[in-house]
Image (tube, rainbow, N blue to C red):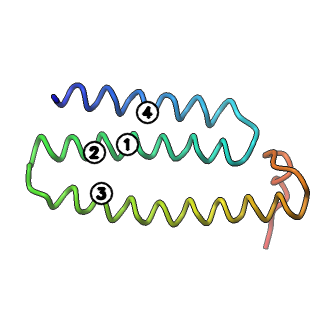
């Protein structure tokens, strides 16, 4: 697998995620699109790091960042669940007036 192929796959992931995030109105689908975009960026970063400096330090850092992003997305899904339970709607229009 070459660097060009890794970057092509990362660009495809990012493009599919961008389309999913911009074309959907359901909060969960928008968050899934954002997650795909983040995974595309991580794949591009990990691929570049692997081909330019093949030490495992960069990949370890990306795994730590990915774990932090997973927790962040879980909190986002929890917020989407709270909005769905309180307003009986899962559309992004229902989440416009969120405040603490």
Q: Which residue is mark 3?
A: 62
Residues packed near mark 4 inside 10 Å, few (<14), some (14 to 19) or many (20 plus) = many
Dot in front, 4 or 2: 4
Residue 42 sits above or below residue 62 on the image: above
Of 26 and 45, the residue lying toward us: 26
Q: How far is disc 4 from disc 3 in space, using C-alphas?
A: 17 Å
- Mark 2 and 3 residues: CB-CB less than 8 Å, in contact? yes
Task: Give the mark, 4 or 2, whose residue is nearer the N terminus.
Answer: 4
Q: Which residue is mark 1?
A: 41
Q: How far is disc 2 from disc 1 in space, using C-alphas?
A: 6 Å
Task: Give the mark, 3 or 1, whose residue is nearer the N terminus.
Answer: 1
Q: Which residue is mark 4?
A: 13
Of 69 and 99, the residue lying toward us: 69
Image location (x, y in percent) of residue 52: 10, 43
- Mark 2 and 1 residues: CB-CB less than 8 Å, in contact? yes
Q: How far is disc 3 from disc 1 in space, using C-alphas?
A: 10 Å
Instruction: Provide the secondary structure element on which disc 2 rests.
Output: helix
Instruction: Provide the secondary structure element on which disc 4 rests.
Output: helix
Q: Which residue is mark 2?
A: 45
Instruction: Provide the secondary structure element on which disc 3 rests.
Output: helix
Task: Give the mark, 4 or 3, whose residue is nearer the N terminus.
Answer: 4
- Mark 4 and 3 residues: CB-CB less than 8 Å, in contact? no
Image location (x, y in percent) of residue 8: 31, 25
Which residue is at 26% across, 62% downward?
61
Q: In terms of image quadrants, where is residue 59?
A: bottom left
Which residue is at 83% across, 57% downward?
84
């Amino acid at each position: 697998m070459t660097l060009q192929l890794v970057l092509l796959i990362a660009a495809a992931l990012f493009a599919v995620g961008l389309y999913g995030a911009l074309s959907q109105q359901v909060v969960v689908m928008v968050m899934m699109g954002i997650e795909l975009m983040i995974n595309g960026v991580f794949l591009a970063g990990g691929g570049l790091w692997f081909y330019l400096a093949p030490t495992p330090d960069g990949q370890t850092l990306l795994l730590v960042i990915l774990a932090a992003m997973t927790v962040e997305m879980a909190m986002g899904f929890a917020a989407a669940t709270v909005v769905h339970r309180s307003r009986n709607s899962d559309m992004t229009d229902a989440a416009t007036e969120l405040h603490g």
